[in-house]
Amino acid sequence: MKQMKFFIFIFFTITLYNCGNKAETNSTEKNTQIVDADLTLKGKDLFEGKGTCIACHKPTSKVIGPSIKEIATIYKKSNGNIIAFLKEESEPIVDKNQYEVMKTNFSITKKMSEEELKALEAYMLSFAD
């Protein structure tokens, strides 16, 4: 009888422990999603405002430069680094013919903080396929 009680005690202890871990994981996932959404929203504000990116890049259509969707998809598939490009630390991988036009905007993006660049990247990558 003692062994049975001990077994039941262990079973319930393990069950309760696992339930607590699952709740903690879900909470962490929700917090990450909130942070990602905030970062993406900040990136959108930068893209359309301070960064002046919207003048040449539209979400799904090419204007002067390629669309955000095209840029994001190519960077995601090739494991490229948008931040390094915006800091002028890597070569263009999307539309190399437009690189000279884009160079004028590096004076803006190079002055952005690391947090701003991460937000800009998060916004752009939100369009990737």
Image (cartoon, rainbow, N blue to C red):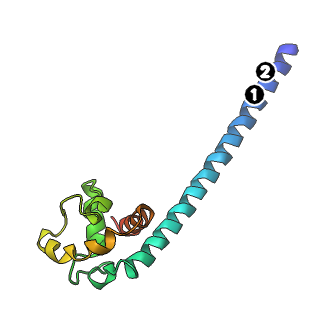
Spatial CA span between label 1 and label 2: 6 Å
Give the quadrant of residue 73.
Answer: bottom left
Q: Which residue is mark 1?
A: 11
Identify the disc placed on residue 44: none
Residue at 49% over, 73% down: 41
Give the quadrant of residue 33.
Answer: bottom right
In depth, the one of 129 and 27 nearer the eye is: 27
Q: Which residue is mark 2?
A: 7
- Residue 31 percent location from the top left of the image: 60, 57
Residue at 75% over, 27% down: 11
Asked which secondary structure carries label 2, the reply is helix
Q: Is 35 placed above or below 20 here?
A: below
In depth, the one of 3 and 129 nearer the eye is: 129
Give the quadrant of residue 45.
Answer: bottom left
| Residue type indicated by callout 1 | Phe
Residue at 31% over, 81% down: 58
Asked which secondary structure carries label 1, the reply is helix
Q: Is residue 30 left or right of residue 91?
A: right
Q: Is residue 48 left or right of residue 91?
A: right
In depth, the one of 23 and 45 nearer the eye is: 45
Sort mark 1 into few (<14), some (14-19) or many (20+) by Cα contacts within 10 Å.
few
- Residue 129 percent location from the top left of the image: 33, 64
- Residue 104 percent location from the top left of the image: 22, 77
Q: Is residue 30 left or right of residue 82?
A: right
| Residue type indicated by callout 2 | Phe
- The residue most toward the right is 1
Sort mark 2 into few (<14), some (14-19) or many (20+) by Cα contacts within 10 Å.
few
Evaluate if marks 1 and 2 touch, with contact meaning CB atoms under 8 Å apart: yes
In depth, the one of 30 and 92 nearer the eye is: 92
